[in-house]
């Protein structure tokens, strides 16, 4: 699972259509303004950047991600744009930006009470911060991850690996409203049809929630961990008659206008 194998980017785009739909929905809700400079923070392999550029033809678009693997994939996909390896938590570009897009990334970044206001400060007057974050920590897929991590020979290795920070719509609204002219917050539950039953669910989360767990384990531990997880997922997400699993996936959306 090293970046040199391009594993991360390849795994992520296995379900590219499903993962890109939320960012298209997010961008559709951004107010129609004159956007000259836009940045995609946590751009991944460039699928969200591509949606951003399609929504804003003529804008100067750039992207950043902490993964060199993801940035390499984005640069190959969209060579006309500038991409850089950078950590959102220490990103110092002052802006101003007319649009900052953060699609399915800020859930990995700590200290939202400081992070979100710092992003708003990088906006030009009238600019927008557009955020989409998975809101699925209470879903069986995540609950089972935490249980299996805590109940196995790898428990000490995996202690603290799970993502636990979570705030509701009211928390983000209260944080952003004093800083912004407009704050729009909503939650959507997508039901993604995955052919292949439990195996497909496991492949989905290999590109996201499973990554930090597997990264902490050696090859033999990974195999056992995935087997246990796959069996638990099969019980929690029974397949329909045609073998399809409908994967419920709640997501939180925020569009904040400075």
Image (cartoon, rainbow, N blue to C red):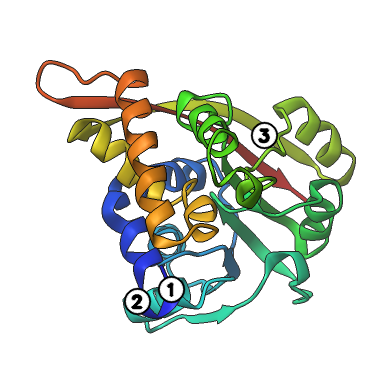
Q: Which residue is mark 1?
A: 2
Identified at 25% across, 39% down, the residue is 200
Q: Nearer the viewer, residue 55 or 188?
A: 188
Query: Considering only vertical position in the picture, is 18 above or below 185?
Result: below
Query: Considering only vertical position in the picture, is 31 above or below 2?
Result: above
Identified at 64% across, 60% down, the residue is 100
x%, y% of residue 59? 51, 71
Residue 191 in view of the camera: no
The residues bearing labels 1 and 2 have C-alpha atoms spaced at a distance of 6 Å
x%, y% of residue 230? 32, 35
CB atoms of marks 2 and 3 within 8 Å: no
Quadrant in the rendering for residue 247 = top left
Q: Around disc 1, counting alpha carbons within 10 Å, would you say few (fewer than 14), some (14 to 19), or many (20 or more)?
A: few
Identified at 85% across, 46% down, the residue is 113
CB atoms of marks 1 and 2 within 8 Å: yes
Query: Residue 201 vs residue 145: left or right?
Result: left
Q: Which residue is mark 3?
A: 184
Query: Residue 117 vs residue 104: left or right?
Result: right
Query: Residue 133 vs residue 144: left or right?
Result: right
Q: Earlier in the sequence, mark 3 or mark 1?
A: 1
SS at circle 1: loop
Q: Nearer the viewer, residue 23 or 258?
A: 23
Q: Earlier in the sequence, mark 2 or mark 3?
A: 2
Q: Which residue is mark 2?
A: 5
């Amino acid at each position: 699972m090293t970046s040199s194998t391009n594993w991360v980017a390849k795994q992520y785009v296995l379900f590219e259509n499903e993962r890109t739909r939320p960012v298209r929905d997010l961008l559709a809700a951004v107010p129609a303004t004159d956007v000259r400079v836009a940045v995609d923070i946590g751009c991944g392999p460039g699928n969200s950047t591509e949606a951003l550029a399609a929504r804003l033809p003529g804008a100067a678009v750039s992207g950043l991600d902490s993964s060199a693997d993801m940035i390499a994939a984005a640069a190959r996909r969209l060579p006309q744009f500038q991409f850089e390896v950078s950590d959102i938590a220490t990103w110092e570009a002052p802006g101003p930006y007319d649009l900052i897009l953060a699609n399915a990334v800020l859930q990995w970044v700590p200290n939202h009470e400081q992070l979100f206001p710092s992003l708003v400060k990088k906006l030009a007057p009238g600019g927008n911060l557009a955020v989409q974050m998975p809101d699925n920590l209470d879903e069986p897929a995540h609950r089972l991850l935490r249980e299996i991590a805590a109940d196995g020979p790898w428990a000490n290795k995996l202690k603290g690996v799970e993502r636990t920070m979570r705030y509701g719509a009211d928390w983000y609204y209260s944080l952003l409203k004093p800083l912004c002219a407009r704050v729009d917050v909503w939650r959507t539950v997508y039901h993604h049809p995955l052919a292949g039953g439990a195996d497909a669910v496991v492949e989905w989360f290999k590109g996201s929630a499973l990554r930090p767990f597997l990264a902490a384990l050696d090859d033999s531990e990974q195999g056992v961990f995935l087997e246990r997880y796959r069996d638990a997922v099969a019980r929690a997400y029974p397949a329909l008659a045609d073998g399809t699993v409908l994967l419920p996936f709640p997501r939180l959306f925020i569009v904040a206008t400075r």
